[in-house]
Image: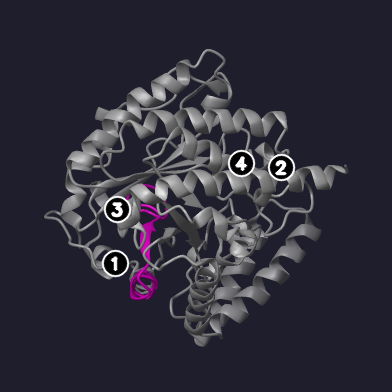
């Protein structure tokens, strides 16, 4: 039997096994078949930057529950009108953990935090993300069903799922791999579609009560759902997880970790205005002139940035936003999953120089479109960094909260 046929046989067996396990789970959760408890939430980056000492992860790599609760004002989240919190967890320390000490330390930190969130009436989505140390990609762990890296990863995810299941008296979900691959269909190695059924089978066997996130390639974008098997969604405690950052030029302007042209892009409004083309081009040229790039790289990146800026500033993106959500609606129908079990688990935009007026408009439009479809959403992120809703003295921005349909607490600004 060829290697391809062996892989297909493994996947087929896993899908059938998942369906069998899920059929048992279905009988216990029929009432949840039409919707998740995750309707409006925020991501909190408490566990995405583990402590590093001497180029390696520290023994106590993750912060404690008390520190996290204070840092992100956990006690005030429910009052904003939220019903869940997403906790991305960098798995790097867990991949270098021969005695299980770091896994126990993570559970000692995240377990009490989940308990506090549950006590406040908030559900929790735990999401496993690729190691930040060394710039690893999630697909680095996708080396085939029998590959050593995938087997190690699946064992770690399974152990976490088993432990989290003990905390699932209130809504609790696990997303086993955040944005699992860059390509919609991978050409440089085994595809996510081969691994996901196996991973979900193991997680469900270990954790019958957890909600489990199902996602596709292409950074979990809508088009990545093409390879998702509908059988994986027959379990009423699964949900479809999608990320949304369109138009990317607007949402990621000024960043230095995304597309190579983004450091040249800033000051873009939403909706775009054609009269700003000259100013945007002048800004890009000035930034390119000051960038420490070889001349040929400078010219090539600037040319692409100028073309992208001209297109963005002369094209209304709102019809394309609606088309993308219509595409998601159609794909969900073909997968046989109800609207209530779709969660846009990431969407957000960087700060804009117009006092976030443009960002507020985008957040209002996108969150409104998502909610109108009956889907849940999770903002990226609540606090800290260019995507945060906080400003001076860590106060939350009233305008941005209201754009999302949330309540502004006392002490918010402006």
Which one is closest to the eye, mark 4 or mark 1? Answer: 4
Which one is closest to the eye, mark 2 or mark 3? Answer: 2
Q: Are marks 2 and 4 in contact (CB under 8 Å)?
A: yes
CA gap between label 2 and label 4 equals: 8 Å
- The residue at the point 37 percent across, 57 percent down is 379
CA gap between label 2 and label 3 equals: 47 Å
> Which residue in the structure is indicated by mark 3?
390
Q: Is residue 157 above or below residue 14?
A: above
229 and 142: which one is in front? 229
SS state under label 4: helix
Of all residues, the one furthest to the right in this rendering is 2
Q: Are marks 4 and 1 in contact (CB under 8 Å)?
A: no
Task: Choose the circle earlier in sequence order: 1 or 3.
Answer: 3
Q: Report the colour scheme.
A: one colour
Q: Which range of residues does the magenta coloring cover? A: 362-391
Q: Quadrant location of residue 399? A: bottom left
CA gap between label 4 and label 3 equals: 40 Å
312 and 139: which one is in front? 139
Q: Is residue 196 visible?
A: no
Q: Is residue 76 above or below residue 377?
A: above
Task: Choose the circle earlier in sequence order: 2 or 4.
Answer: 2
Task: Choose the circle earlier in sequence order: 1 or 2.
Answer: 2
Q: Which numbered marker is on residue 404?
A: 1
Task: Choose the circle earlier in sequence order: 2 or 3.
Answer: 2
> Which residue in the structure is indicated by mark 4?
198
């Amino acid at each position: 039997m060829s290697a391809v046929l062996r892989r297909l046989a493994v996947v087929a067996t896993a899908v059938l096994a998942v369906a069998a396990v899920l059929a048992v789970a279905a009988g216990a959760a029929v009432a949840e078949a039409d919707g998740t408890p995750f309707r409006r939430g925020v991501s909190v980056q408490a566990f995405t930057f583990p402590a590093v000492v001497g180029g390696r992860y520290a023994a106590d790599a993750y912060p404690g529950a008390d520190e996290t609760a204070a840092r992100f004002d956990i006690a005030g989240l429910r009052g904003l009108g939220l019903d869940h919190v997403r906790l991305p967890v960098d798995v790097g320390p867990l991949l270098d953990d021969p005695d299980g000490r770091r896994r126990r330390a993570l559970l000692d930190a995240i377990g009490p935090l989940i308990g506090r969130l549950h006590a406040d009436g908030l559900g929790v989505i735990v999401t496993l993300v690729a190691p930040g140390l060394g710039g690893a990609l999630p697909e680095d762990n996708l080396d085939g069903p029998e590959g050593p890296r995938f087997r190690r990863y699946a064992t770690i995810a399974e152990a976490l799922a088993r432990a989290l299941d003990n905390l699932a008296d209130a809504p609790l979900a696990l997303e086993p791999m955040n944005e699992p691959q860059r390509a919609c269909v991978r050409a440089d190695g085994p595809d996510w579609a081969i691994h996901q059924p196996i991973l979900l089978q193991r997680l469900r066997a270990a954790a019958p009560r957890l909600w489990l996130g199902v996602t596709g390639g292409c950074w979990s974008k809508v088009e990545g759902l093409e390879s998702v098997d509908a059988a994986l969604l027959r379990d009423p405690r699964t949900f479809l997880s999608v990320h949304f950052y369109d138009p990317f030029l607007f949402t990621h302007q000024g960043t230095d970790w995304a597309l190579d042209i983004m450091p040249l892009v800033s000051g873009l409004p939403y909706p775009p205005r054609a009269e700003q083309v000259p100013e945007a081009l002048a800004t890009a040229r000035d930034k390119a002139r000051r960038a420490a790039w070889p001349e040929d790289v400078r010219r090539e990146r600037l040319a692409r940035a100028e073309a992208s800026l001209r297109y963005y500033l002369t094209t209304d993106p709102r019809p394309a936003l609606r088309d993308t959500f219509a595409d998601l609606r159609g794909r969900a129908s073909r997968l046989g999953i109800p609207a209530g079990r779709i969660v846009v688990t990431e969407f957000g935009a960087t700060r804009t120089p117009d006092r976030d007026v443009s960002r507020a408009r985008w957040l209002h439009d996108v969150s409104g479109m998502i909610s109108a479809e009956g889907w849940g959403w999770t903002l990226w992120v609540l606090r800290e960094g260019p995507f945060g809703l906080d400003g001076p003295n860590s106060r939350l921005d009233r305008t941005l909260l209201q754009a999302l349909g949330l309540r502004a607490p006392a002490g918010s600004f402006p």
